Image (cartoon, rainbow, N blue to C red):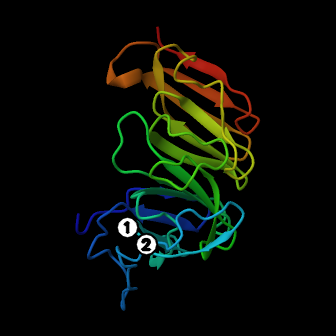
Amino acid sequence: GPGAAPDACHARGNVQLARFARPAPSNPPLTSPPPTAPSPTAARTSPAASPGTDVPAAGTTVVVLKTADGGATWATSPSPCPSTLGEATPASLDGTTVWMVCASVSHDEDQDKAVYLSSDGGATWTLQSSTGGEAPPPVGSLTSAGAILGFTLSAPSTGFMVSSGYGLLRSADRGKTWSPTSVSAKKVPTGNDVLMATFPGASTGWATTCCGGGVPFGSPGLFATTDGGATWSAVATSP
């Protein structure tokens, strides 16, 4: 609602990105004069853009805010998300290579998704993978199975998606293909859901699991990786 704080933020260093899901707030705390937010009706003209093609960034129902001074000032940044995908999560480690996961708002266990990549700080975007449905036509190995619980990067070319009921997914080719990791909602440990993953550096990462479906059963656990998420090992689990 109006005046809401950004509900997604990811960065290392002094470049940060944040987003608001629709509707866009009418009075975000911007410096004077405030930047003009993209029109909610000015949807991208070609949501079914071909992979490998730069998409001229255009406003949709998602408003992206960007800061380059540690959050002192903010300015609007173009969003690649088509009007059918009203949720978005950006991630960047350097402010130049930026990932954006766009997803459908109306979802239960599954969620249509699309992953975009910018190599110029968000000026233009390239469609990397898509599920079809409310997202652009299928591209790559991304599926609608599971709703997005979290998204993070370990390196500019490597991303991780936390998917409800399906565990931690990894892409090592800038979001084009996605594969399950050993931190799976159905395998490690049985019956659990992955809650989050975080990477303090390119090699070291942590993931937590707990309570699949919101019901307290199974064994909550903490898992670690030292090779950028390629392999994981259990650090501790509860009986």
Q: Residue at x 43, y 36 (%)?
A: 110
Residue 83 placement: quadrant:
bottom left
| Extreme residue in the left direction | 2
Quarter of the picture holding the N terminus:
bottom left
Return the residue at label 1: 61
Residue 226 vs 44, above or below: the answer is: above
Residue 198 in view here: no
Residue at (46% x, 25% y) in the render: 193
Q: Which amino acid type is shown beneath numbered disc 2? A: Ala
* Mark 1 residue crowding within 10 angstroms, few (<14) / some (14–19) / many (20+): many
Q: Quick check: 218 left or right of 115?
A: left
Give the residue furthest to the bottom: 33
Q: Which percent across, then down, holds residue 92?
A: 61, 60
Dot 2 alpha-carbon crowd within 10 angstroms: few under 14, some 14 to 19, many 20 or more: many
Give the numbered dot on residue 176.
Answer: none
What percent of the width, then of the height, locates residue 226? Answer: 74, 34
Q: Which residue lies furthest to the top in this view?
A: 239
The Cα–Cα distance between marks 1 and 2, rounded to whole angstroms, is 7 Å
SS state under label 1: loop
Of callouts 1 and 2, the N-terminal one: 2
Hey, what amino acid is under mark 1? Thr
Q: Could you tell me which secondary element the residue under label 2 belongs to? A: loop
Percent position of residue 54, x then y: 67, 71
Query: Quick one: 171 or 42, which is closer to the camera?
Result: 42
Q: Which residue is denoted by mark 2 in the rendering?
A: 43
Circles 1 and 2: CB atoms closer than 8 Å:
yes
Picture quarter containing residue 141?
top right
- The residue nearer to you, when weighing 39 against 135, is 135
In percent of width and height, residue 96 lies at 67, 69
On screen, residue 131 versus residue 139, left or right, reads left
Q: Residue 201, relative to residue 164: is it above or below? A: below
Depth check, mark 1 against mark 2: the one in front is 2
